Image (cartoon, helix red, strand yellow):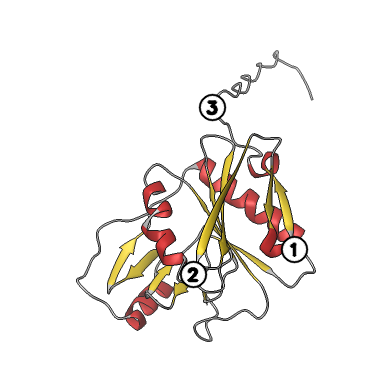
Amino acid sequence: MTAESTRVTYTPAEYLKLERAAETKSEYLNGQIVGMTGASRAHNYITLNVGAELREKLRGSGCRTFVSDMRVRVRRTGLYTYPDVIVACPPLYFEDAEVDTLLNPVVIAEVLSPSTEAYDRGKKFAQYRQVDSLQEYVLVAQDEARVERFVRQGKLWVLSEVTGLDAVLSLEAINCTVRLADIYEGVELPGDEPPAAPVDEAPGATT
């Protein structure tokens, strides 16, 4: 989700002022503002599905689910970014009174895209690991039914993987499960039969 920055350096305050007035989203790190690219239809479906499932399952728990538009700041490194899905649990901490920059996510999920997968797995995950509140990091493929889950165990992050639409993703930090069939609902995966073309109705036919 990166593009060339438009200026050599900005302060965090300058970034936030510009970002809050902008029509598009940008990340910020080391004084640079970096534009975020658009997402595919499958990416959007998966993001919304994950967010909707977590929101429903966490109803009444006090934990909140955010999709795409909630900014996260990594205080130790200065990164400002927009994860695809975030879960945060009480008390929620924000950078300022605007309440649009979260400081203490518990779970972050990113939907992988060809242009961002290396970043999500590498430098971005390295940034997220600096967030003390973060307990689980989830990577969701969009070209197959596969979800990777990294769990913080002390100083280590332990990987597990679930595959197939019959599988279930368990998120222990927030005590809930999500079926992969629900994550990929409405998404055409490789090997799926394409939907049949509609048959034209005969002239004069009614419904």
Question: Residue tagged by mark 2?
Answer: 71
Q: Amino acid at mark 3?
A: Pro
Q: CA distance from mark 1 to mark 3?
A: 31 Å
Q: Closer to the camera, 104 or 25? A: 104
163 displayed left or right of 77: right
Q: CA distance from mark 2 to mark 3?
A: 32 Å
Query: Alpha-carbon neighbours of circle 3 within 10 Å: few (<14), some, or many (≥20)?
Result: few
Q: Earlier in the sequence, mark 1 or mark 3?
A: 1
Looking at the rendering, in which quadrant would you find the N terminus?
bottom left
Q: Position of residue 80 (x, y in %)?
A: 41, 71
User: Where 198 sits versus 187, above or below?
Assistant: above
> In front: mark 1 or mark 2?
1
Instruction: Identify the secondary structure beneath mark 1.
Output: loop
Q: Closer to the camera, 104 or 156? A: 156
Looking at the rendering, in which quadrant would you find the C terminus?
top right
Instruction: Identify the secondary structure beneath mark 2.
Output: strand
Query: Alpha-carbon neighbours of circle 2 within 10 Å: few (<14), some, or many (≥20)?
Result: many
Can you see residue 72? Answer: yes
Q: Position of residue 182 (x, y in %)?
A: 69, 43
Q: Closer to the camera, 104 or 185? A: 104
Q: Amino acid at mark 1?
A: Leu
Q: Amino acid at mark 2?
A: Arg
Question: Residue tagged by mark 1?
Answer: 58
Question: Residue tagged by mark 3?
Answer: 190
Question: Within the image, what quadrant is residue 145 found in?
Answer: top right
